Image: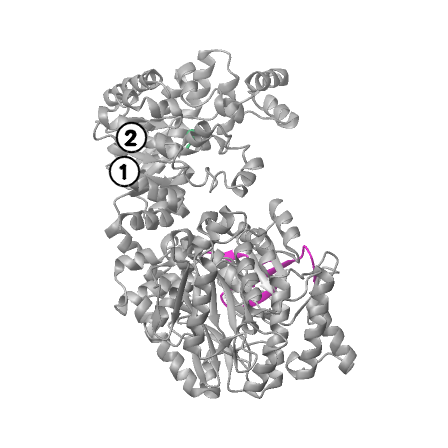
Amino acid sequence: PKYVYTWGAGKADGNGTMKELLGGKGANLAEMTRIGLPVPAGFTITTEVCTYYYANKRSYPKELEAQMQAGIANMEKVMGHKFGDAKGFPLLVAVRSGARDSMPGMMDTILNLGLNDDTVRSLENATGNARFAWDCYRRFVQMYGDVVLGVQKREGEDHEPFESVIEHYKQEAYGRDIVDSDLTAKDQQELVKRFKALVKERTGKVFPHDPWAQLRGAAGAVFGSWMNDRAIVYRRKYNIPSEWGTAVNVQAMVFGNTGESSGSGVAFTRNPANGENEFYGEFLVNAQGEDVVAGVRTPEPVSKLKAVMPKAYAELLKVRKILEKHFKDVQDVEFTIQEGTLYMLQTRNGKRTAAAALKFAADMVKERLIDWKTAVQRNPADQLEQLLAPIFDLAEIKKAKAIATGLPAGPGAASGKIYFNADRAVEAAEKGEKVLLVRIETSPEDLRGMIAAEGILTARGGVSSHAALVARQMGKVCVCGAADIQIDYERRIATVKGQSFAEGDFLSIDGTAGTVYAGQIPTAPSEIIDGLLNNNKAAQKTEKFKNYVQLMEWCKKATKLKVRTNADTPEQTAQALAFGAEGIGLTRTEHMFFEGDRIDAMREMILADNRAAREAALAKLLPYQRKDFFGIFKALKGFPATIRLLDPPLHEFLPHSKEQQLDFSKKIGVPVEKVMARVHELHEFNPMLGFRGCRLGVKYPEITRMQIRAILEAAAEATQKGFKAKPEIMIPLVGFKKELDQQVALVHEIAADIQKEKKVKLSYQVGTMIEVPRGALTADEIAETAEFFSFGTNDLTQTTLGMSRDDSGSFLGAYQESEIMPKNPFASIDQSGVGQLMEIAIEKARRTRPDIKLGICGEHGGDPESVKFCHKIGLAYVSCSPYRVPVARLAAAQAAL
Ligand code: PEP
Ligand code: MG
């Protein structure tokens, strides 16, 4: 089999479509080579080798060695240099990991591989530049020692061991700290010696001299890094299966560090933070690529390259155009300029904020680069919520005190208690605090903390630093490189212009402007929310708002699946309609019982000893419910409303603390002993599997009667007042046809009464939730009575998996960690288990009732993956909370395209 794919001099074995095999980086290097861009030659070792490596006790297929030799031979031919050449200019290579998608936390890059005590001399001779040669060698030993040989910070050590050696040496030789670029060739030579001694001391290993041994070691380190902790954390967060594996890219070195006519940079073909159509990035003169991302020296904006290296800059602008035209998407590139000549080292689709994605897509349709369908696909559904994220209240911001500015790296507004370390940030967030992670700079180790935080603030680093990239991708608010802030990790204090902030103090950051504020600042809704929900005219005139509206119009054109909402009040209903919901998929009537005094009537009902007393209490509840339902029908403007009858165990409505019980007994004049006795009586060991759902209505039909009366009287009133009400009465937790039959009989009986009393014709439906496995399996029988099904996937997941909705948090993390389940099944449908039950239910139900209306109202209705699944299995609608309606609409459209 072919394990090595080469590229160089305009030809490539692979191409841009081969990401599974070659990884994203390798596939695109091949593609760039094919379209004639200046790419230094190289080869990719495929992801299949990674799979082989782990399946075979970390060993390689026997064909690999010969294929790598052929790969190196090809590079030697194209570049005109020999690997390990101790006489002429030696071929040096960079070794990089390359999964399908780039993955922070994996081994990044080893540069200048192929140098040793002999080849460094030949490099020195060939270039006549000793400082350059030894600088390369010193960097190589350091990177290789760290990444491949594992010389890293030990517990209790403050500094990286190699950096400590450098600091020591500077003090010894110069008596002070000097910048790295002032180190002479001799200094570098001495450092190489000391680094090797350090490697020997820490690992017992001799630094490898043979370039081939170096190359094998580096490739092994890349494959090994696929299973390191940071990579695993990242994969879990983004649901990347471990089977994918990574590729290894070996590429001929070009040098950005040969002097003032060389340099390295990174750039986006458009602004990935706000979406502006401007070339956006940064570069450093006389530097290797790693220097730009490492944040040690602060890079210059890429536009300044025009003044320093006009020819290379013009070339780069040309490449920018070619790339966008070819890939039809915004690209994120790495480049090196060696002695005035431009080389492209990488291109990939640029990560972007939701705001940028929206603008890119809208602009590119106008520029005729893509069509509207592609534009819909280009907006990641799981990021859309970012667009609805709050911004700082403008009035408050005028009063607020800006204490520092940094780079606007992740848009939005965040306010929170500051924590200087990821673990403490996670801990605080788990306690429910809003947290800002504040770091001098971030590394992949901080990932957990970044996930937990509302926002991220760093003192160092540019827009392409780790903090910025990861924050943008996660949709976190981020300000980086706020250099005025001094952070003391030891004392857990941040100081800025004489003012100090201790851990736990509030700061606020504006990731759109890059500003840092003292204290807590209230946030305001985004323009989209303001435009849609508050009808704010100024907001409606913004480009963002218009692009959003356009996107939703495109979605409407594509969509098959309708989106409804889970709403319990007229306000929520109105919001959801403004977001484009077409009706209510679930009203949880029990939520209404917690408002105002109603809970008292509810409790009276529960305490009642006999039916008459229960009915008396229910009679007090009836007008409340009727009013609620009327409000909802009115807000719905003719859209249908699925209203569910009482579902939770009665126990949940009773007062539980001693104090509350006393209060309540006084209020309604029953002895507290009686209240306590009833609480005790209703206590259940497994309330979720207990006396709830339709079981309540089976035992206490008067509850059902009251609710049906309230719903249908409200509908009658609506009809009399001249607007349409379309109630769909839904019976929960049905597992037996007879349970449903009994409740439905009550509905029809009461409906007949009301039609007679009010002299109106009601149009209503009765259906059920499918949320226990028996209901799904006997769907053909149940569909004889039910006019519609709504899948209650919260309970269906709980009962199918036998995992409590409320108590599974304690072990689900471990389940995902060990990849037993790829995702939290309560957030994203377990397609092969729960999903299969849904498919069975659909198939059976349609046998009985071909045109049965099918929907979903569990939390999964707002999860993009689950929405796509619902489309696939042929549901008519999904229902989700109001703020997730846009997400569901986008996912539904994407599923249909
Ligand atoms: C469900 O079980 O999925 C559902 C929507 O009902 P609830 O969450 O109220 O149990
Ligand atoms: Mg349920």
For residue 523: magenta?
yes
User: Left or right: 164 with respect to 212?
Assistant: right
Tell me which label, 2 or 1, sits earlier in the chain: 2
Judge: label 2 CB < 8 Å from ligand 1. no
Q: Which mark is residue 874?
A: 1
Name the quadrant where ligand 2 sits: top left
Start-end of magenta stretch: 501-525
Q: What kind of residue is marked 1?
A: Gly
Instruction: Specify few, some or many for label 2: CA neighbours under 10 Å numbering under 14, 14-19, or 20 or more.
Output: many
Q: Nearer the viewer, residue 124 or 826?
A: 124
Q: Quadrant of residue 105?
A: bottom right
Label 2: which residue?
A: 842
Figure check: 460 above or below 832: below
* Proximity of marks 2 and 1: CB atoms separated by less than 8 Å: yes
Figure check: 303 above or below 529: below
Q: Position of residue 267 (x, y in %)?
A: 45, 72
Q: Quadrant of residue 543?
A: bottom left
Q: Position of residue 192 (x, y in %)?
A: 68, 74
Q: What kind of residue is marked 2?
A: Ile
Q: Nearer the viewer, residue 344 or 134?
A: 134
